[in-house]
Amino acid sequence: MEMYEMYYLAFNKSLAPMLFADPNTGRIFDVNQAFLDLLGYPKHEVMGKTAFELGLLSKEGSWPISIKTKNGSLNYGMASANNLLHNEQTIRFMVLQEQTDLPKSDLVRQESENGNFTLEEMLTQTISLISKISEFRDPYTSGHQKRTQKLACAIASEMKLSVEAINNLSMAAAIHDIGKIYIGTDILNKPGALTQLEYQMLQTHVEVGYEIIKDFKLPWKIPKIVSQHHERLDGSGYPKGLTSSQILLESKILAVADVVEAMNSHRPYRPALGIEAAFQEICSFKGKKYDSEVVEHCVRLFKEKHFDFSFSS
């Protein structure tokens, strides 16, 4: 499955305005409904325009925009673009974020005084989109990622990691199993035990996930965290058999959260094993496979602070 095809899984259902364009000419060849709603154009009129005509630069990265709607008004915000491969041709994928609550002068001031704010919002949109790809492909994976993200961030907070580290961990956790979109549903949803070959195929999701996200304009730690979330302190993990000092702390946290959530949840091939079974796993291998401090904070969250995986409506 090519990058273009993976994005198209989420493209039409996303609430974020998006388009595909030629990176050289700026010619628009597809937009989603959210984009049409933002600009007020019918689709056939947009398809005859270029990104430049609408105030969008056909370049990679993120930048502030003032995009003109059909009625002539301007909407301010941010645009983010990445190159994707489709039929051996490069195309430009663009996501927009509107900021209609700010007048132009305030938007410019905000960008100059706190430039990370709007870029962080665009980064959140990108992570959300990648996560949605998992949701459409495999609902089990999507729910697992969200719950693992919640636990991982709670552990990181207990360990008093920096805001930046927690943000990076949160984004990595939200998409840590994205590589599973390349794994056949006959394996993902198999009701019985996997064969050795099937298990080896399943393990490839880590490297595939890294390959999917490594070229995005993400903080460098996010792809690295994803690539290490199945590594173990004693070198028994995969894909590279890294040992303790070679593994990022954020990955060690994600590893524990990942195991606990997976064991506590129902899977197509088995019922939920329960939280006590998860505790037995991480405590039995504390300091061997799993970081001792991470394990201790994880167990304390459940037993003393009554952590649960549910989300408020």
Image (cartoon, grey):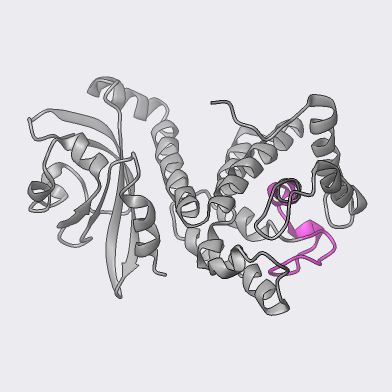
Instruction: State the residue at coordinates (78%, 27%).
Output: 306
Could you say which quadrant of the image residue 15 lies in?
Answer: top left
Could you say which quadrant of the image residue 245 lies in?
Answer: bottom right
* Residue 80 falls left or right of residue 178: left
- Identify which residue, 303 or 46, lies in the foreground: 303
Look at the image and tell me whether residue 41 can be seen.
yes
Instruction: Please check the rendered image and state whether residue 252 is part of the magenta-colored stretch, yes or no.
Output: yes
- Identify which residue, 220 or 199, lies in the foreground: 199
Look at the image and tell me whether residue 175 can be seen.
no
Instruction: State the residue at coordinates (34%, 68%).
Output: 85
**What x and y, as percent, mark residue 166?**
63, 37
Instruction: Please check the rendered image and state whether residue 122 is part of the magenta-colored stretch, yes or no.
Output: no
Instruction: State the residue at coordinates (58%, 38%).
Output: 167
**What x and y, as percent, mark residue 140?**
58, 51
Q: Where 3 falls versus 110 (above or below)? A: below
- Identify which residue, 217 or 34, lies in the foreground: 34
* Residue at the right extreme of this rendering: 284
* Residue 132 falls left or right of residue 75: right
**What x and y, as percent, mark residue 141?**
58, 53
**What x and y, as percent, mark residue 197?**
68, 79
Number of labels in the image equals: 0
* Residue 155 falls left or right of residue 142: right
Residue range (magenta): 232-259
Instruction: State the residue at coordinates (58%, 48%).
Output: 172
Query: Quadrant of the image for the N terminus?
Result: bottom left
